[in-house]
């Protein structure tokens, strides 16, 4: 190929939706490297046994962890070692005041819709009642809010922000 042919070829590739490496522009797969990315195996010497284990793990769809490995992984996520553990609060029981009647009152107040603060999608599948201050004994109407199951789980990630946002909503209702 002459220089002129190479230049023409490069120009034609740039003008198409396919990049010079044969991938569509903007639709990169997860396994493709980004500019400046250093692969995990850079500078490491890989023996054939390790390579076989890696390929077996990826190729065999029925590959599972051993019982011992599963047990070790489970123990790393239990109790105080769990990333979302706070003072053992999950062991506290709900009071008898937190029953179907109060849940129905709160759902009616919130018009049977999830009140997640940035929710634009319709997420009314499974509605739950969430305690704003995370205290299972505080069952006043001002402390309870309707959330879908998905957002109720998310509310435990960033508690401080959720408390602020939910309290703003409650103030709007009761003012």
Image (tube, rainbow, N blue to C red):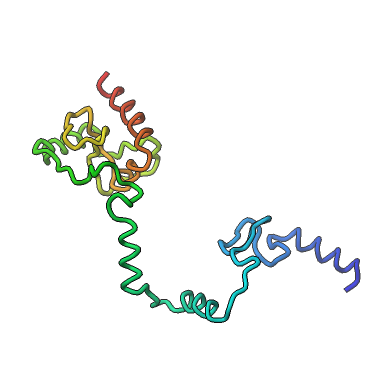
Q: Residue at x 38, y 43 (%)?
A: 121
Q: How many marks?
A: 0
Query: Residue 108, position in %: x, y?
Result: 20, 34
Image quadrant in which you'd find residue 31: bottom right
Residue furthest top in the image: 175
Residue 38 point in image, percent of width and height: 64, 60
Question: Does 14 appear above or below 121?
Answer: below
Give the side of residue 19 with respect to residue 9, left or right: left
Q: Position of residue 117 (x, y in %)?
A: 37, 35
Question: Would you say 134 lies left or right of 99 here?
Answer: right
Please state the horizontal and vertical placement of residue 79, each as a whole percent of the image.
27, 52
Tell me if 128 is positioned left or right of 53 in this view: left
Is residue 175 positioned above or below 27 on the image?
Answer: above
Rendering quarter of residue 61 = bottom left
Residue depicted at 33% across the width and 46% down the height = 84
Return the residue nearer the eye: 15 or 54.
Answer: 54
What residue is drawn where x is 28% and y is 41%?
147
- Nearer to the camera, 4 or 30: 30
Q: Tell me which residue sits at (88%, 74%) in the image.
A: 1
Quadrant position of residue 18: bottom right
Quadrant of the rendering where the C terminus is positioned? top left
Residue situated in front as seen by the camera: 59 or 70: 70
Seen as rendered, the residue at the extreme left is: 96
């Amino acid at each position: 190929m002459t220089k002129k042919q190479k230049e023409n070829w490069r120009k034609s590739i740039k003008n198409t939706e396919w990049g010079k490496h044969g991938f569509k522009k903007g639709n990169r797969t997860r396994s493709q490297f980004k500019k400046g990315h250093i692969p995990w195996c850079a500078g490491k010497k890989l023996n054939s046994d390790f390579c076989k284990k890696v390929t077996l793990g990826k190729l065999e769809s029925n590959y599972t962890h051993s019982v011992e490995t599963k047990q070790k992984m489970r123990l790393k996520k239990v109790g105080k070692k769990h990333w979302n553990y706070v003072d053992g609060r999950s062991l506290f029981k709900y009071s008898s005041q937190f029953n179907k009647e109060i849940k129905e009152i709160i759902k009616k107040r919130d018009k049977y819709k999830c009140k997640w603060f940035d929710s634009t999608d319709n997420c009314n599948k499974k509605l739950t009642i969430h305690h704003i201050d995370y205290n299972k004994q505080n069952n006043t109407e001002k402390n309870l809010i309707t959330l879908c199951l998905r957002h109720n789980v998310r509310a435990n990630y960033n508690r401080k922000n959720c408390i602020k946002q939910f309290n703003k909503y409650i103030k709007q209702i009761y003012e």
